[in-house]
Amino acid sequence: MKEKLMNIVKNALIQSGINEQNKPIIIEKTKDNSHGDYACNIAMQLAGVLKKNPREIATTLISSMKDECIDHIEIAGPGFINFFLNKNYLFDNIVTVLKEKENYGKVNIGKKEPIIIEYVSANPTGFLHIGHARGAAYGDALSRIQSFAGYKVTRQYYVNDAGNQINNLGISINARYHELYNIPMEIPEGGYVGKEIKEIALDIQKEYGDSKLDAELSFFKEIGIKALLKKIETDLNAFRVPFDLWTSEQWLYDTGRVSKVLEELKKGNETYTEDNALWLKTENYGDEKNRVLVKNDGTYTYFLPDIAGHLYKYELGNRKCIDVFGADHHGYINRLKAALQIFGHDPDSLDIKICQMVRMVKDGKEVKMSKRTGNAYTLNDLMEEVGVDAARYFFAEKSLDTQMDFDLDLATQKSNDNPVYYIQYAYVRIASILKQKEIKELSKFETIESEYALNLLSKVYEFKDAVTQASMKNAPHIIANYAYSLATAFHTFYAHEKVLTEDEKYSMERLNLIQAVAYTLKNALELIGVGIRTEM
């Protein structure tokens, strides 16, 4: 509805001969129904430019605002334009929801444009931790939203399976394997000492006995990567986070993509040598400084395969790429955009989202270690303690670029203070009522008139706006907060108005209404990876 009203205002500006259309048209939901359903402050924004009284501007504009969705328009205060919606428009939307069901709320912003969203991409050297969990929840929710908004989405996991950290993984597993035979072997600085490393060593012993004591390092690397990736994928699937594409860094090397990138950059005169290292001239393309591609010892930096990996995204036909990186990767934004520009891609086609830190809090204190394992708090620990629904919602409700405290006590509460419980309880209440009487779908509504019912209907109608805004801003928290506001509108309606009475017409109209709410709530929760419940 916001987008529709925005277009109505835009057309009114044109028809009124007002050319100052660079002012943002802001449509806000009103907090008080006496002020209408939506309000716009465009007249006050234009007052200074047009040197006119804002109420005079508003009067001129509303004379050109005609649409079947509007019942009437009022000018309030210094010049607010308040829109009162046609109630029949809201009633017709009940029919729309019951017809479209799981498709209600879909928009076609993307028009099947292919985009690729990379998230998690944790090194296969250990279990996923809480930072990975937040990035996973965000990336998956964003993928669901963009698919719902009409984009052709590819969900990508970039596997960092090359480089020194993988060598250290192989050495660490080999050392633990030798320990099983009382043969001491030193774990290198930067090696891995988690319990998962010991478990992999035990698995090798079970399958191969002592026959791999003289095996090459490549054996232990391959075993380790395979075992840890399997564990990562298992945990992510349990967290409702699937992937379409797993791209191996080592594969980029093996297929010659990394060496090809390096040669093309050299040929294009985009590199230079200094201090025996090879540098890329990213400063020429908006980066704050030039970046090393090949170190003075001849080894490649992570930047070089990262360039090859991003070019591969475009090679697949994607026109837009979204990366979800950890908080320590902020410096990667400009260098990657610069590299893409060198290869002829629009730097704005790459959108890098930075996932800020998460603190786990219990009893008001930060929790860093799992009581169960005594190790760092992992995604698996979180799922076991609070469940997938609570974890997904708590991550989704906060904007990714803000640091967050995850309140473990609140997430496990069975009370209205817990937003997940509160939202799911709204669905449970609806499901309980719908079990009691079969619905006959209606096309005409005559008894729905209370402010509580109309507020609820208006909130259902806002779902497409929420999806549109979440898609355009890459902001799943808009959907999470919408689901909460829809649940609030339902609980308020439920507290003030009975659904089932002896009046058949009265009851059936409200059954249609709450069924529409149920579909909308389920669709909203689905977009952020949260399930519904029919009993609690």
Image: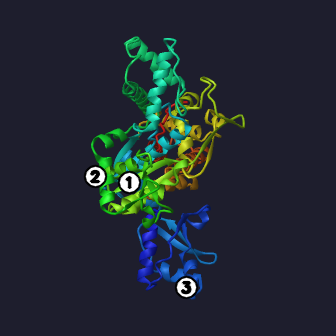
Residue 242 appears in the picture as rendered: yes
In-front residue for pair 367/208:
208
Disc 1: CA contacts within 10 A as few (<14), some (14-19) or many (>=20): many
Q: Position of residue 61 (x, y in %)?
A: 49, 80
Q: What element carries label 3?
A: helix
* Residue at point 58%, 37% (across, down): 421
- How far apart are labels 3 and 2 at the CA level? 48 Å
Q: By what rule are the colours in the image chosen?
A: rainbow
Of labels 3 and 2, earlier in sequence is 3
Circle count = 3
Q: What residue type is labelled 2?
A: Glu
Quarter in which the N terminus is drawn: bottom left
In-front residue for pair 141/227:
227
Q: What residue type is labelled 1?
A: Cys
- Residue picked out by circle 2: 315
* Residue at point 33%, 58% (across, down): 265
Q: Which of marks 1 and 2 is in front?
A: 2
Residue 464 appears in the picture as rendered: no
In-front residue for pair 305/77:
305
Disc 3: CA contacts within 10 A as few (<14), some (14-19) or many (>=20): few
Q: Which of marks 3 and 1 is in front?
A: 1
Q: Which of marks 3 and 2 is in front?
A: 2
- Residue picked out by circle 1: 321
Is 25 above or below relative to 420?
below
Q: Where is residue 106 in the image (x, y as percent from the top left)?
A: 38, 52
- Residue picked out by circle 3: 49
43 on left or right of 522: right
